[in-house]
Image (tube, rainbow, N blue to C red):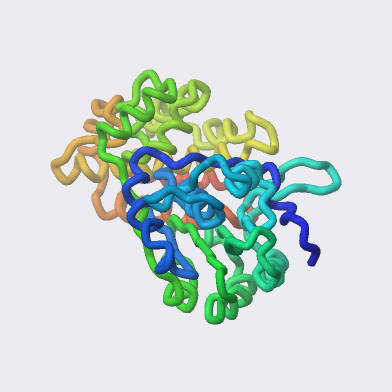
Amino acid sequence: MTSDPAPEAARLPWSPLLPWQVDAARSTLGQRASFPHALLIHGPRGIGKHALALNFAQALLCETPRADGLACGACAGCRYAVAGQHPDLMRLELLVIDPEEDTLEVTEVIGIDRVRALTEFVQLTSHRQRAKVAVIAPAERMNAAAANALLKTLEEPPPGTYLILVSDEPQRMPATLRSRCRKLAAPLPDSAEARAWLAAQGVARPDVALAQAAGAPLRALAIADPAVQEERRAWLTALSAPERLSAPGLAARIDAGGKDERRARLAHALEWLIAWTADLARIVAGDTARQNPDAAAPLGRLATRVAPLALFRYHRSLLQQRAMLSHPLQPRLVAEAMLLDYRALF
């Protein structure tokens, strides 16, 4: 392995520290001497775990850190980190650079070849004499061989080496990996803080977006996109009338955005189905719709018709399907099967 910056680090998106993370970052980084060599940041999707990990990495590489432990943001180390050019920072993510096309590509898993490259990377002497840092996100998407290859580095990290793992679903990681990491639950914003942040990002109805995203502000920002909202309305309208629902017709919308968008469109549809059935279950139990407050009336009507046990089993099958999104599949056919099962509930 050469001493050049890892190619997968260059030009990857960088996220600033989010407002609700500042106190936790100060608390963790203020004691640099006790910062763990392996840290597992976990929590729900869409709350900024990846941003927190990147900013931890920047602070560990900062050459003039602030008194509270945060990165100064102005030194050469900080500038290199944010630009994706720091030779002592490696990022193992699902975005990688295609060197032939000079473009970013999405991968399904983090494979053993990249973990082997990480093993070589941490053995090299630090270029800028601060630390060697690797961010692995999402850690549960390492395949079995990659996870096994990482174990030795976790067991015997070279001095000055820090591995920061990020996971939405740490239970999917091997227990041997989890047990070798210090755990950090990523901070959650309160509703007022999340609304204020979304409003600052230009979201017109932050309350509605937050409800749909189960309180996760980064997910709320993504789904507030007008095109996503228009598609959501089409799906919810169809789900509101299962007796008229055409499973093949609605599933065909997965293909409307072209081949490259099919998996993302399926992921959106799956999230809408999960939120829809969760709200149905809440209403059946005497609660109210939380993620689809704008569809409370049709949900209320459907709740009188659905069998609770069948609904529970269907909702569980959707969660299992979400865990399989990283595997090869035919998005339209997956959507059609889910919709046929949904219609059978009524």
Determine whether 105 is above or below 196 in the image: below
Res 332 seen here: no
Q: Residue furthest right?
A: 100
Q: Where on the picture, by quarter, is residue 128?
A: bottom right
**Of 43 and 54, which appears nearest the observer?**
54
Left or right: residue 1 compared with residue 299: right
Rendering coords of residue 346 (x, y %): 33, 41
Rendering coords of residue 179 (x, y %): 42, 76
Write the residue at 44% across / 71% down.
181
**Of 141 and 24, which appears nearest the observer?**
24
Q: Residue furthest top?
A: 204
**Of 272 and 24, which appears nearest the observer?**
24
Left or right: residue 265 compared with residue 191: right
Rendering coords of residue 37 (x, y %): 49, 70
Determine whether 345 is above or below 32 in the image: above
Left or right: residue 339 compared with residue 13: left
Rendering coords of residue 257 (x, y %): 64, 30
Determine whether 119 is above or below 273 in the image: below
**Of 189 and 216, which appears nearest the observer?**
189
Write the residue at 79% across / 67% down.
1
Q: Where on the picture, by quarter, is residue 300?
A: top left
Write the residue at 52% across / 32% down.
250
Res 135 seen here: yes
Q: How many marks?
A: 0
